[in-house]
Image: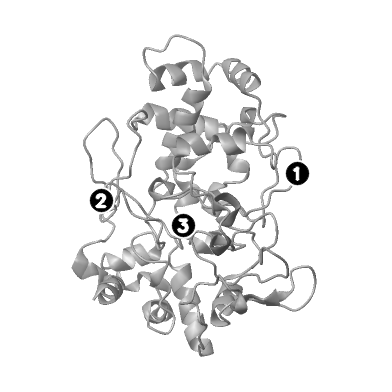
Amino acid sequence: MKRSVKVFWFLAPLTLGLALGGSRPVDGPYDWKLPVGFPTPIVPADNPMTAAKVELGRHLFFDKRLSGNGTQSCASCHRPDRAFADDRPVTQGSTGEPGVRNPMSLVNVAYAGVLTWSNPGHRTLEAQVSVPLFGTHPVELGAEKDAVLKSLESESRYGPLFAAAFPGHDGPYTIDQVSKALACFQRSLISAGSPYDRYRRGEIGAISEAAKRGEFVFVGPRLDCARCHGEELFTDTTVSTVDPAKVVKFHNNGLYNVQGPTSYPQPSIGVAEHTKRPEDMGKFKAPSLRNIALTAPYMHDGSIATLEGVVDHYAAGGRTIKDGPHAGVGRDNPNKDPELKGFRLFPSDKEALIAFLESLTDPTIATNPAFSDPWTPGRH
Protein backbone atom coordinates (compact mmCIF):
# COMPACT_ATOMS: atom_id res chain seq x y z
CA MET A 1 0.00 0.00 0.00
CA LYS A 2 2.80 2.41 0.81
CA ARG A 3 4.37 1.97 -2.61
CA SER A 4 1.08 2.52 -4.44
CA VAL A 5 0.56 5.80 -2.59
CA LYS A 6 4.02 6.94 -3.61
CA VAL A 7 3.47 6.09 -7.25
CA PHE A 8 0.06 7.77 -7.20
CA TRP A 9 1.71 10.96 -5.92
CA PHE A 10 3.79 11.15 -9.06
CA LEU A 11 1.21 10.07 -11.57
CA ALA A 12 -1.72 12.14 -10.32
CA PRO A 13 -0.15 15.15 -8.58
CA LEU A 14 -2.88 17.58 -9.54
CA THR A 15 -5.46 15.54 -7.64
CA LEU A 16 -3.27 15.69 -4.55
CA GLY A 17 -3.08 19.47 -4.72
CA LEU A 18 0.71 19.74 -4.40
CA ALA A 19 1.24 22.17 -7.25
CA LEU A 20 3.29 25.33 -7.06
CA GLY A 21 1.05 28.27 -6.45
CA GLY A 22 2.63 31.46 -5.19
CA SER A 23 3.53 32.30 -1.62
CA ARG A 24 2.09 30.88 1.54
CA PRO A 25 2.68 33.08 4.57
CA VAL A 26 3.59 31.51 7.88
CA ASP A 27 3.51 32.85 11.41
CA GLY A 28 6.45 34.98 12.48
CA PRO A 29 8.61 37.74 11.01
CA TYR A 30 9.75 35.82 7.93
CA ASP A 31 7.59 35.03 4.90
CA TRP A 32 8.96 31.81 3.42
CA LYS A 33 6.98 32.14 0.18
CA LEU A 34 6.74 28.37 0.22
CA PRO A 35 5.49 26.51 -2.83
CA VAL A 36 2.17 24.84 -2.09
CA GLY A 37 2.90 21.34 -0.79
CA PHE A 38 6.23 22.34 0.74
CA PRO A 39 6.08 22.11 4.55
CA THR A 40 7.69 24.66 6.82
CA PRO A 41 11.39 23.91 7.33
CA ILE A 42 12.82 23.17 10.76
CA VAL A 43 14.61 26.21 12.20
CA PRO A 44 16.73 26.18 15.39
CA ALA A 45 15.08 28.03 18.25
CA ASP A 46 18.14 30.22 18.77
CA ASN A 47 18.25 31.39 15.15
CA PRO A 48 14.77 32.35 13.94
CA MET A 49 14.49 33.39 10.32
CA THR A 50 14.28 37.11 9.61
CA ALA A 51 14.58 38.98 6.34
CA ALA A 52 17.44 41.03 7.81
CA LYS A 53 19.48 37.93 8.66
CA VAL A 54 18.82 36.48 5.21
CA GLU A 55 20.05 39.70 3.60
CA LEU A 56 23.18 39.78 5.75
CA GLY A 57 23.77 36.13 4.93
CA ARG A 58 23.44 36.84 1.21
CA HIS A 59 26.20 39.44 1.44
CA LEU A 60 28.41 37.08 3.43
CA PHE A 61 27.78 34.15 1.10
CA PHE A 62 29.15 36.04 -1.90
CA ASP A 63 31.94 37.86 -0.04
CA LYS A 64 35.54 36.78 -0.69
CA ARG A 65 36.52 38.29 2.63
CA LEU A 66 35.45 34.99 4.16
CA SER A 67 38.49 33.24 2.68
CA GLY A 68 41.93 33.44 4.22
CA ASN A 69 43.54 34.95 1.13
CA GLY A 70 40.54 36.86 -0.23
CA THR A 71 40.21 34.75 -3.37
CA GLN A 72 37.04 32.73 -2.76
CA SER A 73 33.57 33.01 -1.31
CA CYS A 74 30.97 30.36 -0.51
CA ALA A 75 29.60 30.99 -3.99
CA SER A 76 32.89 29.92 -5.56
CA CYS A 77 31.86 26.29 -5.03
CA HIS A 78 28.10 26.87 -4.82
CA ARG A 79 27.28 28.88 -7.92
CA PRO A 80 23.76 30.19 -8.63
CA ASP A 81 24.09 29.27 -12.31
CA ARG A 82 24.75 25.66 -11.23
CA ALA A 83 21.83 25.55 -8.76
CA PHE A 84 24.31 26.44 -6.01
CA ALA A 85 26.49 23.46 -6.90
CA ASP A 86 29.65 23.39 -9.04
CA ASP A 87 30.72 21.97 -12.39
CA ARG A 88 33.98 20.53 -11.04
CA PRO A 89 34.15 16.93 -9.85
CA VAL A 90 35.44 18.01 -6.43
CA THR A 91 35.98 21.29 -4.66
CA GLN A 92 39.14 23.32 -4.96
CA GLY A 93 39.96 25.43 -1.96
CA SER A 94 41.30 28.97 -1.79
CA THR A 95 44.88 27.67 -1.57
CA GLY A 96 44.43 25.41 -4.58
CA GLU A 97 44.15 22.24 -2.52
CA PRO A 98 41.66 19.84 -4.12
CA GLY A 99 38.79 18.50 -2.05
CA VAL A 100 37.53 14.94 -2.00
CA ARG A 101 33.79 15.33 -2.69
CA ASN A 102 31.51 16.94 -5.21
CA PRO A 103 29.87 20.19 -3.99
CA MET A 104 26.18 19.53 -3.36
CA SER A 105 23.44 21.86 -4.49
CA LEU A 106 22.21 24.12 -1.69
CA VAL A 107 18.78 24.71 -3.23
CA ASN A 108 16.15 23.49 -0.76
CA VAL A 109 18.89 22.65 1.77
CA ALA A 110 16.47 23.86 4.46
CA TYR A 111 14.90 20.40 4.23
CA ALA A 112 18.11 18.38 4.41
CA GLY A 113 18.00 15.87 7.25
CA VAL A 114 21.78 15.68 7.20
CA LEU A 115 24.29 17.93 5.50
CA THR A 116 27.19 16.82 3.31
CA TRP A 117 27.35 13.44 1.65
CA SER A 118 28.07 11.10 4.51
CA ASN A 119 28.48 12.71 7.92
CA PRO A 120 25.40 11.77 10.00
CA GLY A 121 26.46 14.27 12.66
CA HIS A 122 26.14 17.36 10.46
CA ARG A 123 22.52 18.33 10.96
CA THR A 124 22.39 22.13 11.29
CA LEU A 125 23.65 24.73 8.87
CA GLU A 126 24.84 26.87 11.77
CA ALA A 127 27.32 24.20 12.86
CA GLN A 128 28.23 22.93 9.41
CA VAL A 129 29.34 26.33 8.11
CA SER A 130 32.51 26.11 10.20
CA VAL A 131 33.75 23.22 8.01
CA PRO A 132 34.25 25.21 4.77
CA LEU A 133 35.25 28.32 6.71
CA PHE A 134 37.85 26.91 9.07
CA GLY A 135 38.42 23.26 8.13
CA THR A 136 41.92 22.13 7.23
CA HIS A 137 41.36 18.60 5.90
CA PRO A 138 41.13 19.76 3.16
CA VAL A 139 41.44 23.54 3.21
CA GLU A 140 38.39 25.15 1.63
CA LEU A 141 38.04 28.84 2.44
CA GLY A 142 41.00 28.68 4.80
CA ALA A 143 39.69 31.45 7.03
CA GLU A 144 41.01 32.55 10.41
CA LYS A 145 38.37 33.81 12.81
CA ASP A 146 39.89 37.08 13.99
CA ALA A 147 41.10 38.01 10.51
CA VAL A 148 37.66 37.37 9.00
CA LEU A 149 35.91 39.55 11.55
CA LYS A 150 38.45 42.33 11.15
CA SER A 151 37.99 42.24 7.37
CA LEU A 152 34.20 42.40 7.67
CA GLU A 153 34.42 45.35 10.07
CA SER A 154 36.41 47.24 7.45
CA GLU A 155 33.49 47.12 5.00
CA SER A 156 31.07 50.00 5.65
CA ARG A 157 28.09 48.20 4.16
CA TYR A 158 28.12 45.64 6.97
CA GLY A 159 27.41 48.14 9.75
CA PRO A 160 23.69 48.57 9.04
CA LEU A 161 23.35 44.95 7.88
CA PHE A 162 24.62 43.49 11.16
CA ALA A 163 22.62 46.04 13.17
CA ALA A 164 19.40 45.08 11.39
CA ALA A 165 20.07 41.36 11.64
CA PHE A 166 21.04 41.38 15.32
CA PRO A 167 19.31 44.36 16.93
CA GLY A 168 20.46 45.20 20.40
CA HIS A 169 23.96 43.81 19.88
CA ASP A 170 26.31 46.78 20.11
CA GLY A 171 29.61 44.90 20.31
CA PRO A 172 31.91 43.79 17.51
CA TYR A 173 30.77 41.22 14.99
CA THR A 174 31.03 37.57 16.03
CA ILE A 175 31.52 34.26 14.23
CA ASP A 176 28.24 33.12 15.79
CA GLN A 177 26.47 35.96 13.97
CA VAL A 178 28.23 35.12 10.72
CA SER A 179 27.23 31.46 11.02
CA LYS A 180 23.61 32.27 11.83
CA ALA A 181 23.25 34.74 8.96
CA LEU A 182 24.79 32.33 6.46
CA ALA A 183 22.46 29.59 7.69
CA CYS A 184 19.41 31.83 7.24
CA PHE A 185 20.38 32.75 3.68
CA GLN A 186 20.90 29.11 2.76
CA ARG A 187 17.51 28.17 4.22
CA SER A 188 15.94 30.85 2.05
CA LEU A 189 17.08 29.07 -1.13
CA ILE A 190 13.76 27.35 -1.69
CA SER A 191 12.73 26.72 -5.25
CA ALA A 192 10.11 24.71 -7.11
CA GLY A 193 9.67 26.48 -10.41
CA SER A 194 10.68 23.73 -12.82
CA PRO A 195 8.71 22.79 -15.96
CA TYR A 196 7.60 19.67 -14.06
CA ASP A 197 6.16 21.87 -11.30
CA ARG A 198 4.25 23.88 -13.89
CA TYR A 199 2.99 20.63 -15.38
CA ARG A 200 1.79 19.50 -11.98
CA ARG A 201 -0.24 22.65 -11.51
CA GLY A 202 -2.07 22.10 -14.76
CA GLU A 203 0.13 23.46 -17.55
CA ILE A 204 -0.05 20.28 -19.60
CA GLY A 205 2.36 21.52 -22.27
CA ALA A 206 5.08 22.53 -19.80
CA ILE A 207 6.96 19.28 -20.35
CA SER A 208 7.40 17.14 -23.44
CA GLU A 209 5.57 13.94 -24.19
CA ALA A 210 8.89 12.16 -23.71
CA ALA A 211 9.19 13.60 -20.19
CA LYS A 212 5.65 12.44 -19.39
CA ARG A 213 6.60 8.92 -20.47
CA GLY A 214 9.81 9.26 -18.48
CA GLU A 215 7.82 9.87 -15.31
CA PHE A 216 6.22 6.45 -15.71
CA VAL A 217 9.64 4.89 -16.25
CA PHE A 218 10.97 6.68 -13.16
CA VAL A 219 8.28 5.36 -10.81
CA GLY A 220 7.64 2.04 -12.52
CA PRO A 221 8.49 -1.27 -10.89
CA ARG A 222 11.47 -1.95 -13.14
CA LEU A 223 13.38 1.06 -11.82
CA ASP A 224 11.43 2.34 -8.79
CA CYS A 225 13.72 5.38 -8.61
CA ALA A 226 11.22 7.00 -6.25
CA ARG A 227 12.19 4.53 -3.53
CA CYS A 228 15.24 6.71 -2.82
CA HIS A 229 14.29 9.81 -4.84
CA GLY A 230 10.67 10.44 -3.93
CA GLU A 231 8.50 13.03 -2.23
CA GLU A 232 8.60 16.73 -3.05
CA LEU A 233 12.38 17.00 -3.22
CA PHE A 234 13.08 13.70 -4.98
CA THR A 235 15.19 12.36 -2.12
CA ASP A 236 14.63 10.25 0.98
CA THR A 237 16.55 12.65 3.24
CA THR A 238 13.86 15.31 3.63
CA VAL A 239 12.86 16.46 7.10
CA SER A 240 10.50 19.28 8.07
CA THR A 241 8.13 20.40 10.78
CA VAL A 242 5.72 17.77 9.46
CA ASP A 243 8.17 14.93 10.09
CA PRO A 244 11.02 16.24 12.26
CA ALA A 245 12.06 12.81 13.56
CA LYS A 246 12.37 11.14 10.18
CA VAL A 247 15.26 8.68 9.94
CA VAL A 248 17.65 9.71 7.19
CA LYS A 249 18.95 6.85 5.09
CA PHE A 250 22.30 6.31 3.40
CA HIS A 251 22.94 3.97 0.48
CA ASN A 252 25.78 2.05 -1.12
CA ASN A 253 25.00 2.16 -4.84
CA GLY A 254 27.83 -0.01 -6.12
CA LEU A 255 29.94 2.83 -7.46
CA TYR A 256 33.16 1.06 -6.44
CA ASN A 257 34.41 -2.30 -5.26
CA VAL A 258 38.16 -1.89 -4.94
CA GLN A 259 40.45 -4.47 -3.42
CA GLY A 260 41.46 -3.99 0.19
CA PRO A 261 39.71 -3.42 3.49
CA THR A 262 37.41 -0.53 2.48
CA SER A 263 35.92 -1.41 -0.97
CA TYR A 264 35.62 2.35 -1.62
CA PRO A 265 38.65 4.54 -2.36
CA GLN A 266 40.07 6.45 0.59
CA PRO A 267 39.25 8.90 2.01
CA SER A 268 35.64 8.97 0.73
CA ILE A 269 34.43 5.68 2.17
CA GLY A 270 30.97 6.89 3.16
CA VAL A 271 29.26 6.84 6.52
CA ALA A 272 31.83 4.30 7.77
CA GLU A 273 34.34 7.15 7.96
CA HIS A 274 32.36 8.44 10.94
CA THR A 275 30.65 5.37 12.40
CA LYS A 276 33.65 3.02 11.92
CA ARG A 277 31.17 0.24 11.14
CA PRO A 278 32.08 -2.05 8.23
CA GLU A 279 28.45 -2.29 7.13
CA ASP A 280 28.42 1.46 6.48
CA MET A 281 31.21 1.26 3.92
CA GLY A 282 30.32 3.13 0.74
CA LYS A 283 27.02 4.50 2.04
CA PHE A 284 26.16 8.07 1.04
CA LYS A 285 22.98 10.14 1.08
CA ALA A 286 20.69 10.20 -1.94
CA PRO A 287 20.78 13.82 -3.13
CA SER A 288 17.75 15.65 -4.43
CA LEU A 289 17.14 15.28 -8.14
CA ARG A 290 15.72 18.77 -8.41
CA ASN A 291 17.85 20.90 -10.76
CA ILE A 292 19.78 17.80 -11.79
CA ALA A 293 20.43 19.21 -15.27
CA LEU A 294 22.57 21.94 -13.69
CA THR A 295 24.54 19.91 -11.16
CA ALA A 296 26.79 17.66 -13.27
CA PRO A 297 29.13 15.91 -12.69
CA TYR A 298 27.36 13.38 -10.48
CA MET A 299 27.96 11.10 -7.48
CA HIS A 300 29.79 11.97 -4.27
CA ASP A 301 33.10 12.31 -6.08
CA GLY A 302 31.87 13.73 -9.38
CA SER A 303 33.04 10.60 -11.17
CA ILE A 304 30.11 10.30 -13.61
CA ALA A 305 29.96 13.15 -16.08
CA THR A 306 26.46 12.87 -17.57
CA LEU A 307 22.91 11.81 -16.79
CA GLU A 308 23.28 9.15 -19.47
CA GLY A 309 26.21 7.77 -17.51
CA VAL A 310 24.19 7.78 -14.29
CA VAL A 311 21.37 5.80 -15.92
CA ASP A 312 23.91 3.33 -17.33
CA HIS A 313 25.43 2.90 -13.87
CA TYR A 314 22.10 1.96 -12.30
CA ALA A 315 21.08 -0.16 -15.29
CA ALA A 316 24.21 -2.25 -14.70
CA GLY A 317 23.41 -2.58 -11.01
CA GLY A 318 26.75 -1.01 -10.19
CA ARG A 319 29.78 0.30 -12.03
CA THR A 320 32.53 -1.90 -13.42
CA ILE A 321 35.99 -0.32 -13.59
CA LYS A 322 38.23 -2.60 -15.61
CA ASP A 323 41.69 -1.33 -14.70
CA GLY A 324 43.61 1.17 -12.65
CA PRO A 325 43.69 1.77 -8.89
CA HIS A 326 39.88 1.68 -8.61
CA ALA A 327 39.36 -1.48 -10.64
CA GLY A 328 36.50 -3.66 -9.50
CA VAL A 329 32.91 -4.76 -10.13
CA GLY A 330 30.63 -2.42 -8.22
CA ARG A 331 27.52 -4.56 -8.51
CA ASP A 332 29.34 -7.19 -6.40
CA ASN A 333 30.11 -4.80 -3.55
CA PRO A 334 29.02 -6.66 -0.38
CA ASN A 335 27.42 -3.55 1.10
CA LYS A 336 25.50 -2.54 -2.01
CA ASP A 337 21.80 -1.82 -1.51
CA PRO A 338 20.11 -5.14 -2.36
CA GLU A 339 17.31 -3.33 -4.21
CA LEU A 340 19.76 -2.04 -6.82
CA LYS A 341 19.67 -5.09 -9.07
CA GLY A 342 20.00 -3.41 -12.43
CA PHE A 343 17.47 -3.20 -15.25
CA ARG A 344 17.11 -3.10 -19.03
CA LEU A 345 15.72 -0.12 -20.92
CA PHE A 346 14.86 0.40 -24.54
CA PRO A 347 16.72 3.43 -25.96
CA SER A 348 13.42 5.31 -26.17
CA ASP A 349 12.76 4.65 -22.48
CA LYS A 350 16.20 5.91 -21.54
CA GLU A 351 15.66 9.09 -23.56
CA ALA A 352 12.27 9.58 -21.91
CA LEU A 353 13.71 9.07 -18.42
CA ILE A 354 16.42 11.66 -19.03
CA ALA A 355 13.85 14.08 -20.44
CA PHE A 356 11.84 13.69 -17.23
CA LEU A 357 14.91 14.26 -15.05
CA GLU A 358 15.82 17.38 -16.99
CA SER A 359 12.28 18.70 -16.51
CA LEU A 360 12.97 18.92 -12.76
CA THR A 361 15.28 21.92 -13.21
CA ASP A 362 14.12 25.40 -12.25
CA PRO A 363 15.60 27.91 -14.73
CA THR A 364 14.83 30.90 -12.48
CA ILE A 365 17.41 30.05 -9.81
CA ALA A 366 20.26 31.83 -11.54
CA THR A 367 18.17 34.95 -12.21
CA ASN A 368 16.32 35.27 -8.90
CA PRO A 369 17.49 38.61 -7.43
CA ALA A 370 16.96 37.28 -3.90
CA PHE A 371 19.66 34.66 -4.61
CA SER A 372 22.05 36.97 -6.48
CA ASP A 373 25.48 38.38 -5.72
CA PRO A 374 24.95 41.75 -3.98
CA TRP A 375 28.57 42.78 -4.63
CA THR A 376 28.03 42.82 -8.40
CA PRO A 377 27.96 46.45 -9.60
CA GLY A 378 24.40 47.70 -9.75
CA ARG A 379 23.08 45.12 -7.29
CA HIS A 380 22.43 45.54 -3.58
Q: Residue furthest top?
A: 170
Residue density around tag 1, few if under 14, some if 14–19, many if 20 or more, within 10 Å: some
Of the residues under marks 3 and 2, which one precedes in the sequence?
A: 2
Residue 369 visible from this viewpoint: no
Q: Residue at x 21, y 36 (%)?
A: 27
User: Which residue is at the front of the view, 305 or 22?
Assistant: 305
3 or 1: mark nearer the eye: 1
Q: Residue furthest right?
A: 324
Q: Residue at x 25, y 61 (%)?
A: 18
Residue denoted by label 1: 97
Residue denoted by label 3: 363
Amino acid of disc 2 = Val
Above-or-below relation of 294 to 109: below
* Relative to 128, 328 lies left or right: right
Q: Residue at x 23, y 46 (%)?
A: 24
User: Which residue is at the front of the view, 8 or 269?
Assistant: 269
Residue 99 placed where, x, y %?
69, 48
Instruction: Tell me, yes or no, whether the two marked residues, 2 and 1, touch with CB atoms within 8 Å.
Output: no
Residue 242 image label: 2
Residue density around tag 2, few if under 14, some if 14–19, many if 20 or more, within 10 Å: few
Residue 113 placed where, x, y %?
41, 50
3 or 2: mark nearer the eye: 2
Above-or-below relation of 315 to 278: below
Above-or-below relation of 204 to 232: below
User: Which residue is at the front of the view, 30 or 176?
Assistant: 176
Q: Secondary structure at mark 2?
A: loop
Amino acid of disc 3 = Pro
- Spatial CA distance of label 2 from label 1 is 41 Å
* Relative to 93, 345 lies left or right: left
- Spatial CA distance of label 3 from label 1 is 32 Å
